[in-house]
Amino acid sequence: MFPQTLTDGYRAFLSDRFPQESRRFKQLATSQSPEVLVIGCCDSRVAPEAIFDAGPGELFVIRNVANIVPVYETGGDYHGTSAAIEFAVQSLEVKHIVVLGHATCGGIKAYANKAKPLSPGNFIGKWVSLVAPAEAKAGDSSAEDYLTRLEHAMVSQSIENLLTFPFIKERVESGTLQLHGAHFGVASGQLLVRDPQTGDFVPAVDQEGGPIRPSATITCA
């Protein structure tokens, strides 16, 4: 049977949200024009629409294990993340790309701890091997906060990898596309944003909810 929790949720959607936003949904039926692409982790605890209080059509979201952006390449057979990035940038012409990491990321932990394969195909192991270039950025692996620093490093690495896509680099250089890094604390609810100059992650807002600094962006000289 179809999961009861989903049926109940859909029933609530029909009676509450859909009537309130029916006009919006009718507009979305023919087109979409989100300005922001969020590349996040598929972890069930980290939903970009919830974190950013976004309505339908406001965010284009790509989710995979450990919010990884692979380096641009045209070999191989299937490129799900790259295909979605291509669509968001080339077709939807988003103005911002946010790579969103998070605390206690299972994919990052699996890489750091060299976890045993979950299946003969070892799909997760092969995928998180893409974390390797970020490892050098994270520093001492014996440090108490190593996993957090590796999570931050993977966000930075994914931003670097985005710039290997020619159509992204071209737009960043022309100023029509901005790249951002962020990290969400699941327990604390704190959002950190990456300073593109220092690579440090700092709170997006102060304790009263006011902005600490303008949104950090990646640009090319």
Image (tube, rainbow, N blue to C red):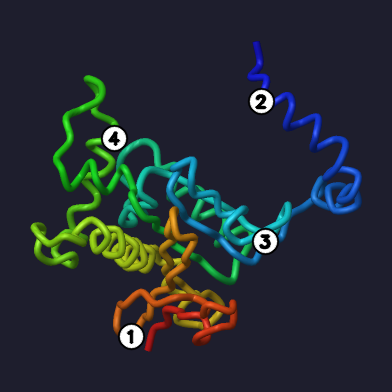
Query: Secondary structure under badge 4?
Result: helix
Among numbered discs 3 and 1, the one appearing first in the sequence: 3
Q: Does the residue at mark 4 contact the one at mark 1 (Cβ under 8 Å)? A: no
Mark toward the viewer: 3 or 1: 1
Q: CA distance from mark 4 to mark 1?
A: 32 Å
Among numbered discs 2 and 4, the one appearing first in the sequence: 2
Amino acid type at circle 2 is Thr
- The residue under the point 47% across, 77% down is 172
x, y percent for residue 206: 51, 80
Query: Secondary structure under badge 1?
Result: loop
Q: CA distance from mark 3 to mark 1?
A: 27 Å
The residue beneath circle 3 is: 34
- The residue under the point 29% across, 59% down is 154
Amino acid type at circle 4 is Ile
> Is the residue marked by circle 4 packed among few (<14), some (14-19), or many (20+) residues within 10 Å?
some
Query: Secondary structure under badge 3?
Result: loop
Assign the C terminus to one quadrant of the image: bottom left
Among numbered discs 2 and 3, the one appearing first in the sequence: 2
